[in-house]
Every structure is written in structure tokens, then in C-alpha cells.
Image: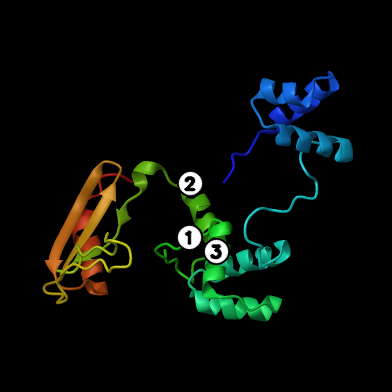
Amino acid sequence: MPTEISEDLRWRVVYLYNDDFSITDIANTLYVSKSFVIKIINLYVKWACVTSPVKGVPGRRKLFSRSEMCIFQNLVKDKVDWYLDELVYEMENLTGKRVSVSALWRSLYYLGITRKKLQKAAYERSELMRTHYLGVIGEHYTSNQLIFLDKCAKDERSLSRLYGYSPRNTRACKKVVFVRGKRYTILPALTLDGFIAVDVFEGACDRKRFVDFVLNQVVCNITFI
């Protein structure tokens, strides 16, 4: 592929031409070919510019128009977990154009959209209620009144990783444990000063176990109002 010559250098050709430099002198001064100088001069004489205004976009012709690419972008934004064949079918319904999976993948690349691990968010979550809750907390409570409680669990499969590396066109395979084994649950209570209570036990955590942890280990360690 030839090197793209900057627009500034193209205009230098025009400036020297207007100063009555010959085509040979312009080419030798700017270290370009005489055919390039002639091309730029012809463009300037015809269009009063140094780049062709009718030059198309380089590369393969796009199957989707600009408006259809916007439709595709909004579709992917709404259906983030769809497979490529599902997107192909839906784009055919929306635009009337049937494209291949590879062509659709190139359109995703053109839009800067990549495939990555899906981050799941609760469908029941309300951003309005979350904002109201944060406002109430910030207005009526101080930071040293906050205690954060959560539970997590660990078994033999917890340390299994989801991604790995391997040569192209080969699977990344590693032997891992499929049997869950013993399951341990941890209940921590965290404040700005650190953990004030921790409970670790074997098995799952039910409602009674969680309430007992709050009443017997957390509440008794609260030293502020």
C-alpha cells in the first residue's frame, strides 16, 4: 500500500506552482514524483483543492448504510447477549438485508464493539430507588454509623478460572475439579475501622443463621450510636 502523503505537502505543490516553479523543480524540491505533482495540479485546477472531493471511502464496500449501522448499534446495545446468527436474523427483519455471520462480525469491529464476559445486573434493580436510598443515607447518617454485611462461600470449584491462553484455533484446556466438595460460608461485618465480627462455618447460610450472626456477634460489638 503506498504511503499517504499529507495535505500540507500537497498544498506545497500548489504554492510552488503558483510561484512559477516547473514540474521537475517541484518534484526535486519536495522529493516526490512528477506524476504526483501533475495529479495535484490537475486537482487544484479542476476542484480548487488538493484532495479529490469525489473519492470514495477506501476498503471493502459497506453492506450497511450509516442509518442501518445506527440500527445495528442500538440492537447490540439492547441485546448484549445475543449470538451472531440471532443478530443476523434480526437485522434482516429490521433492514431487509441478509448478511453473513463474518460480515456482521466485521460490522461489530467497525463499530468498536468486542465480545467480553457478561456482567449480570439484577433485573429488579431500580436506579431511582437506589439514588433515593443513597440520598437518605447521606443526609441522616454519618460514616462511622455504617456497617456493611455480606456473605460469600467457597468450595473446591471456587478457584477455577474462566479464561486461559492457547494457540490460535485450539482450545485452552486445563484439568479442574468438577465435584463441589465441602462448602464453607463466611459472614463478615465491616466498618471504617475494620472487621468487627466474622463467622465461618461449613454449609450454606439460611435466614436464621444470618439473624443469629447479626444479633449475637454484630450488635453486641457496636460501641457507637
Residue 87's disc is none
Above or below 156: residue 53: above
Residue at the far front in the pictured view: 24
Q: How many marks?
A: 3
Q: Which residue is label 3 attached to?
A: 106
Badge 2 density bin: few <14, some 14–19, many ≥20, Cα 10 Å:
few
Examine the rendered structure and indicate whether residue 222 appears above or below residue 201: above
Q: CA distance from mark 1 to mark 3?
A: 11 Å
Residue 154: x and y in percent read 18, 65
Q: Residue at x 61, y 64 (%)?
A: 73
| Label 1 Cα crowd, 10 Å radius (few <14 / some 14-19 / many 20+) | few
Of residues 113 and 196, the one drawn nearer to the viewer in this rendering: 113
- Kindly identify the amino acid type of the residue bearing the numbered disc 1: Thr
Residue 197: x and y in percent read: 19, 53
Residue 110 in the image: state x and y as whole percent.
58, 58
Disc marking residue 114: 1
Please report whichever mark, 1 or 3, sits nearer to the chain's N-terminal start.
3
Q: Residue at x 46, y 50 (%)?
A: 137
Q: Is residue 200 left or right of residue 98?
A: left
Image quadrant where residue 166 sits: bottom left
Tell me the residue at 61%/79% (across/down): 90
Q: Position of residue 55 (x, y in %)?
A: 75, 50
Q: For the residue marked with disc 2, what is the amino acid?
A: Gly
**Tag nearer the camera, 2 or 3:** 3
Q: Nearer the viewer, residue 52 or 125?
A: 52
Query: Which mark is drawn over residue 138?
Result: 2
